[in-house]
């Protein structure tokens, strides 16, 4: 639990509703005062001396001296201060908060420990820096402008008020700036980032965000005290905050942004961490695999929960019929992913939730785990067969060398075809997501003198898969006439084939992969279990229950030859290891499949079957339960839901 929260006793007002909507202004640190007494400013007391001379600011003076900001307001830097009258209790509370945090030890991501630094001390960032601007500014009749305070907050400065807090005194000239006095403190309005750090229910997500904080000194904005031994000494250092998560998820610390965050409470965070952590079980040769797994599990929890309110087409979030999160990619292949429909209706992700307004957006608390991971990171994927990155072709030993066993041709789809007197619109099949891209891969066996080879075989590897999920794998195979209008019926033949499955090993095998071994088993890979040229019986896949593309055998599949076939070759496959968001090369993925034609010589010679494979793509879909995977049936009506491209 945090040692303290926002200084509620400093003001009775609640946080203002909505973002201020103030654009940043360009501040000239060397600008002259606009007051008529500017020419006498050098002869005036410092800001701190003016505060000491005002009896109503005695408690504010005490806070400044305790925290060390008397040096800041007594230095040469041009500043504007809105000094509030404080009660003794208010001053004591601020001082107590400063002391508590100053002596609070926190543990860093690398395991080291340090005290909370002044840049993170809320007595400074939420109180003192909320009343100081880093330049001198006077007001005059009908004046109105936006002021950026030292803590980055924007406030509206007018002739008689700052954020509607009226002045007791104004335009008091000091030798290092301008002093205003207020009857009470200004209210600190937290940003989305600030609120995460203030709310005890959101400690877990706040701690994760702060792991990525990086600060750099802003020399031009820092308050200088003077020069010692030729180096500038700062009475107060302004640090610029950067965070890797901001560029990916949303700039929640920027005051000129507007975000809505469906923040997981600590309870939801804990439950989802237990739920997602097993998905990221990596093999031993992944460096720091436990840390990588934990990091990916935590990112899985928060990704998809941030919404850019400026990107909702000008509508208020309560009026939107859909919300698009910051992970959304504007690409036709990502249809439906990272989009939440009817968010405010019954069952929607915001249904019944009351937002907490922040200076740059709002926060909703998710106490239930409302974000479906299938809509964010457990997406279904496909591989285009024409892309070579995740495919290998079979090879054979011939004349002392390893040579290709097959040849490949990329065939382009035509727009229309006529088959048996009927004209078909192929472009419509692409629009309906039945076909992807503009072509398919054709694989045919090669013949060598004295070598009998009637088998087409290819291997494909599934990248970005999770451990401990259940995968269904589908081939989308096409008839030959989609690339040529004029095929005869006798040329359109079915193909019988078999499939083998192999999973990534925890460690590489130790058997020697010498030239003799390679000559016998050229497709073997030491990172996968022993394959015996991919013909080991225990790796042979059975036709899944309910699959209609069976060749009348428990292990043999059959295309129709004259239709687009969506063939399930593996169902409820549960990998032990993950390759998600880390491993990419073929030999480092987890799931490998071999597809090989299995046509008899007699069927070939009689023209009953073909040994040529024609594949458009491979689809693989994850499920969290075995029952869900086994009961799922992929057909043309729901195929569009599973069209996510790599």
Image: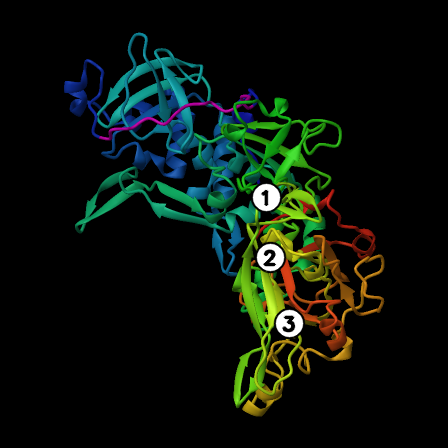
Vertical placement of 221 versus 445: above or below?
above
Q: Which residues are magenta?
A: 15-29
The residue wearing badge 2 is 383
The residue positioned 50% from the left and 46% from the top of the image is 245
Where in the figure is residue 111, as x and y percent of width and height? Answer: 52, 61
Which one is in front, 242 or 11?
Answer: 242
Q: For label 1, count other residues whose C-alpha is less than 10 Å away and answer few (under 14), some (14-19) or many (20+).
A: many
Where in the figure is residue 121, as x and y percent of width and height? Answer: 46, 41
Does label 1 or label 3 sit earlier along the sequence?
Answer: 1
Which quadrant holds the N terminus?
Answer: top right
- The kind of secondary structure element at disc 1 is helix
Vertical placement of 596 versus 91: above or below?
below
Does label 1 or label 2 sit earlier along the sequence?
Answer: 1
Vertical placement of 78 versus 40: above or below?
below
**Mark 1 or mark 3, which is nearer to you?**
3
Where in the figure is residue 191, as x and y percent of width and height? Answer: 50, 32
The residue wearing badge 3 is 457
Q: Is residue 627 magenta?
A: no
Q: For label 2, count other residues whose C-alpha is less than 10 Å away and answer few (under 14), some (14-19) or many (20+).
A: many
Query: How many marks are shown on the rendered structure?
Result: 3
- Furthest-top residue in this view: 141
When asked about the image quadrant of residue 627, the answer is bottom right
Does label 3 or label 2 sit earlier along the sequence?
Answer: 2
**Residue 180 left/right relative to 425:** left
The residue wearing badge 1 is 334
Q: Can residue 566 be seen at all in this image of the molecule?
A: yes
Q: For label 3, count other residues whose C-alpha is less than 10 Å away and answer few (under 14), some (14-19) or many (20+).
A: many
């Amino acid at each position: 639990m945090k040692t303290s929260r926002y200084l509620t006793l400093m003001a009775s007002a609640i946080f203002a509703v909505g973002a201020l909507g103030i654009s940043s202004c360009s501040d000239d640190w060397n600008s002259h005062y606009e007051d008529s007494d500017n020419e006498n400013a050098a002869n005036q007391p410092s800001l701190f001396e003016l505060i000491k001379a005002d009896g109503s600011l005695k408690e504010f003076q005490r806070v400044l001296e305790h925290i060390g900001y008397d040096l800041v307001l007594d230095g040469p830097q041009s500043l504007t201060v809105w000094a509030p009258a404080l009660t003794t209790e208010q001053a004591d509370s601020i001082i107590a908060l400063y002391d508590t945090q100053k002596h609070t030890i926190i543990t860093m991501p690398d395991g080291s420990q340090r005290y909370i630094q002044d840049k993170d001390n809320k007595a400074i960032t939420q109180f003192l820096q909320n009343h100081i601007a880093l330049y001198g500014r006077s007001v005059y009749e009908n004046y109105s402008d936006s002021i950026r305070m030292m803590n980055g907050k924007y406030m509206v400065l007018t002739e008689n008020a700052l954020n509607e807090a009226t002045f007791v005194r104004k335009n008091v000239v000091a030798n290092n700036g301008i002093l205003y006095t207020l009857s009470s403190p200004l209210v600190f309005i937290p940003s989305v980032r600030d609120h995460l750090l203030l709310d005890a229910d959101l400690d877990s997500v706040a701690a994760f965000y702060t792991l990525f904080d990086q600060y750099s000194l802003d020399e031009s904005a820092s308050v200088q005290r003077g020069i010692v031994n030729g180096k500038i000494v700062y009475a107060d250092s302004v640090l610029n905050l950067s965070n890797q998560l901001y560029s990916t998820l949303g700039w929640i610390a920027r005051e000129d942004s507007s975000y809505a965050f469906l923040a997981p409470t600590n309870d939801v965070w804990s439950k989802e961490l237990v739920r997602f952590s097993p998905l990221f079980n990596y093999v031993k040769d992944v460096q720091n695999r436990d840390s990588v797994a934990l990091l990916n599990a935590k990112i899985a929890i928060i990704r998809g929960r941030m919404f850019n309110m400026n990107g909702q087409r000008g509508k208020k979030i309560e009026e939107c019929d859909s919300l698009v999160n910051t992970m959304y990619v504007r690409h036709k292949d990502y249809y439906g992913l990272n989009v939440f429909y009817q968010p405010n209706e019954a069952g929607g992700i915001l249904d019944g939730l009351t937002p907490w307004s922040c200076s740059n957006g709002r926060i909703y608390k998710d106490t239930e785990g409302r974000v479906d991971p299938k809509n964010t990171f457990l997406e279904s994927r496909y591989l285009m067969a024409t892309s070579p990155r995740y495919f290998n072709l079979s090879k054979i030993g011939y004349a002392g060398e390893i040579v290709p066993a097959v040849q490949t041709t990329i065939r382009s789809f035509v727009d229309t075809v006529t088959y048996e007197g009927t004209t078909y619109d192929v472009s419509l099949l692409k629009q309906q997501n039945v076909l992807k891209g503009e072509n398919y891969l054709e694989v045919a066996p090669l013949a060598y003198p004295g070598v009998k080879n009637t088998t087409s075989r290819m291997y494909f590897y599934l990248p970005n898969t999770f451990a401990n999920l259940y995968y269904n794998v589908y081939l989308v195979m096409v008839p030959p006439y989609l690339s040529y209008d004029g095929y005869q019926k006798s040329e359109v033949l079915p193909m019988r084939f078999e499939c083998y499955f192999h999973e990534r090993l925890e460690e590489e095998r130790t058997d020697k992969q010498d030239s003799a071994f390679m000559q016998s088993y050229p497709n073997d890979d030491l990172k996968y279990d022993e394959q015996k040229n991919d013909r080991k019986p225990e790796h042979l896949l059975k036709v899944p229950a309910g699959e209609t593309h069976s060749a009348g055998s428990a292990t043999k599949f059959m295309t129709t030859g004259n239709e687009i076939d969506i063939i399930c070759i593996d169902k409820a496959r549960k990998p032990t290891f993950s390759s998600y968001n880390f491993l990419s090369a073929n030999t480092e993925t987890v799931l490998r499949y071999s597809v090989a034609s299995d046509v008899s010589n007699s069927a070939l010679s009689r023209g009953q079957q073909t040994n040529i494979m024609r594949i458009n793509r491979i689809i693989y879909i994850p499920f969290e339960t075995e029952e869900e995977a086994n009961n799922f049936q992929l057909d043309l009506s729901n195929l569009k839901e599973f069209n996510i491209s790599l």
